[in-house]
Structures are given as structure tokens and as C-alpha cells.
Amino acid sequence: MTAPTPPTNNAPHAAGATRKRDPINWPTSLFLILSPIAAAVAVPLYIADYGLSLFEILHFVVLCYVSGLGVTVGYHRLFAHRAYKAPRAVQVITALAGTMTFQQSVLTWTSEHRYHHKYVDQNGFPYDPYSITMGFFYAHMGWLLRRRSPALPRTNVNDLQKDAFLRFQDRHIVILMVLMGLGVPTLIGMGYALVAGLPLAQGTLSGFIFGGIARIVFVQHGTFFINSLSHYMGRRPYDGESTARDSSFVAFFTWGEGYHNYHHAFQTDYRCGIRAWHFDPGKWVIWSLERLGLAKKLGRIPEATVRMSILREKRRRIESSDPLWLENAGEQVREAVQALETRLEEMHGRARVLWREYRNLREQRVGRRNERIRALRAELRTLMDEFRETLRRWEEVIAGAHLRPALAQ
Ligand SMILES: [Zn+2]
Ligand SMILES: [Zn+2]
């Protein structure tokens, strides 16, 4: 594919100017505007005529999860980030489930998403297709309403272009989205009507409205919130200079993708919510697939690396509010901080080496009882205990130096 000629200057486009100049993408715009209107009219009309049964609620919720997880587990973490490996069946099923959300093909989605990560917040060329710096609405869905020029070349998905199934999905994406996103739910509704002895017309409408159009609108805006709200609202514990933010609230509506500051910092991790209590159905599905032998090589950032990134971010925040803090903190504090940080860096390096060996051995399926794996696990546990204790002392020293306010996130 030939790359388009980039603009001669790399200055950011003025948001308004870009939107005025670029032609409207009519099919996408009409779909994005008419589908919520159709859902808002059809749902109450259906309920007024037929009432609301458990089937409609279950159909809506189950297909929200199936199709939303198709995007999260398939489009996003498997294809766009290659955060794990999966056999053909899982690739095809997740791609088809993602197709149900009317978010274009894996190739289109992935290409835009990789540009988003690589050029996040940049508006020159190449650019972040859904940059939050162009405004909340633009990042949410405004970017889809016009055909932005120059278009971004798809050269960043050459790895996926080799896949015949993904090329097929891309070539026939419109018909596949209609069949999977509207056809399948309508058939499910018809099947339910036949089994439950209801009029076929009722089942057809029920399936089309609740499993189809209303569910598509809900899931689409869930995904759109990752580009808008997740770059707008929440905490930034790993990288305070990125616009991406962590929010449990957004995670709840986005199958776990709301831990977006972490995701931008560590894209190859198959998890977005890394703590056990983080609501991340995407990671639970991938983890379960691994247990069933249907996924392998799950990307996982070692705990020491994650904690070091939090430490560095805290350090950056202190330095940006008070560049001379260490010099002014006094010799005793300065020496203590430096010694603790040196020790933490050493332990981090050692933890990464141990972690790599541990992961490699586990991937080779040597078995849980393997002596070396057991020894590595024990060494890592001891190392991490000391690491956490050293980190706690670091926090204490910093707090003791009256820098606590600067640590607030
Ligand atoms: Zn991503
Ligand atoms: Zn993002």
C-alpha cells in the first residue's frame, strides 16, 4: 500500500478547520446518528405493545458481553496488541463476536488503534485518529463522522494482513456486520418465539431491537467512552504525562478497559485492571482460555516493573512541583532516598531476570512440580517481600521530608 503524502508542515491541525475541510463519511454518520434514535423509539414502543420479558433483558445483556468481549478480548488485546496467542478457533470466534458491534474490521480497527497508541494526542501527521486534544466529542465519536485527510496508511497492520481470514473479514465487513450484528440476534428472537409459542413477528422484533440495534448502540458507546472518558476522567498512577486515565467507573461499562493509564503504559499486558479486585472481564476470559489450553504466552508485566513505574511517576510529580526538593531535603534524607532507590533498581533488575526465566519455563510446560520453577517462585517471593518493604521505607522517607502533598495523585 502506498503511503499518502504527508502535509509539508507537521503543525497540529486546528480542530475546527480539519472538521470543516474533510468530507462527511455519510454511511457511518447516518448509522451513528440514526441507530440511537431508532433504539430510543423502538424499545419503548415494543415494551408498550408486548411488555418486557426476561428473554429481552437476558438477550441484551448476554449479547452485550459476547460482542463487547469480542472487541476487548479479540480486536483489542489479541489482534491490536498481540497480548497473548490463541488458536485459530479463538481468533475467528472473537473476531466474529467483535463484528457484531459494527466497529469495522479487525484490520481497520487495529490500524486506527495502533496509531492511537503510537501518536497519542498528536494531530500532525501521522496522527492519533481519536485524539482527546481535538475535544471530548471528537474523541468519542466525532472522528468517525468525517473522512479525515490525509488518511493514515494501513502499513502498521502488515503482520495481520497475512491472515486470510482477517482479509476476508475486511473485504466483506459490511455484510458480515449486518449478518452478525442484526441477523443473528433476529434469528435468536425468532427461535425464542417458536420455542415459547409467541407470534413470530414479536420474536423477530424482540431479537432485532434488544439483541440488535439497542445492544449495538450500548456497546458502541461503551467503546467510544474508552477514547473519550478514559482520556478525560480518572487517575494517572503510572504515567502522569499521558492523557490516558484509570477509572473503575469506566471499566465497569467497558469490559475492564477503563484502566487506561495502565494500558497505555503497558500495552503488551493482557490485563488492564491488574489488581485482583479490578473489574476486568477481558482479563478473566483470557485467563480462563489459558486454563482451558485455548490461549498461551499471556503478556504480563512483572509486579516490580509496575511498582517502579508508580515510584518514578511519584518522583516526577515531586520534581515538577519542586525541582530542588532533593537538594533542599538535607544530606541525611538525600542519602537515604538515593540508597533506597539504588536498592530498588537492583531488585527490579533481578526480579525481571527471574520473572523471564520463570515465564519461559512455564511456557515450555515443564510442569508445576519442576524444581527450578519452584525455586524461582520462592526466590521471587522473597525478593518481592524485600522490594515492597524497601518501597514502604522510601515512601516513609519522602513523607518524612514533608513532601506528602506532592505525592497526591
Ligand atoms: Zn490499546
Ligand atoms: Zn487511549
Image: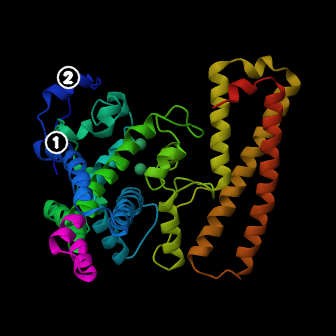
Q: Position of residue 271 (x, y in %)?
A: 52, 57
Total tally of numbered discs in the picture: 2
Q: Which residue is mark 1?
A: 29
Amino acid type at circle 2 is: Ala
Which tag, 2 or 1, sits closer to the chain's start?
A: 2
Tell me where the magenta segment starts and ends, as one range.
188-207
Local crowd size for mark 2, using a 10 Å CA cut-off: few (<14), some (14–19), many (≥20): few
> Does the image show residue 99?
no
Residue at 27% over, 33% down: 125
Which colour scheme appears in the figure? Answer: rainbow
Q: Is residue 320 above or below residue 106?
A: above
Mark-to-mark CA distance, 2 and 1 = 19 Å
Q: Position of residue 216 (x, y in %)?
A: 28, 55
Magenta includes 200? yes
Q: Position of residue 299 (x, y in %)?
A: 52, 61
- Where, by quadrant of the figure, is residue 152 drawn? top left
Local crowd size for mark 1, using a 10 Å CA cut-off: few (<14), some (14–19), many (≥20): some
The answer to which of 326 and 14 lies nearer the viewer is 14
- Where, by quadrant of the figure, is residue 78 drawn? bottom left
Residue at 25% over, 56% down: 48
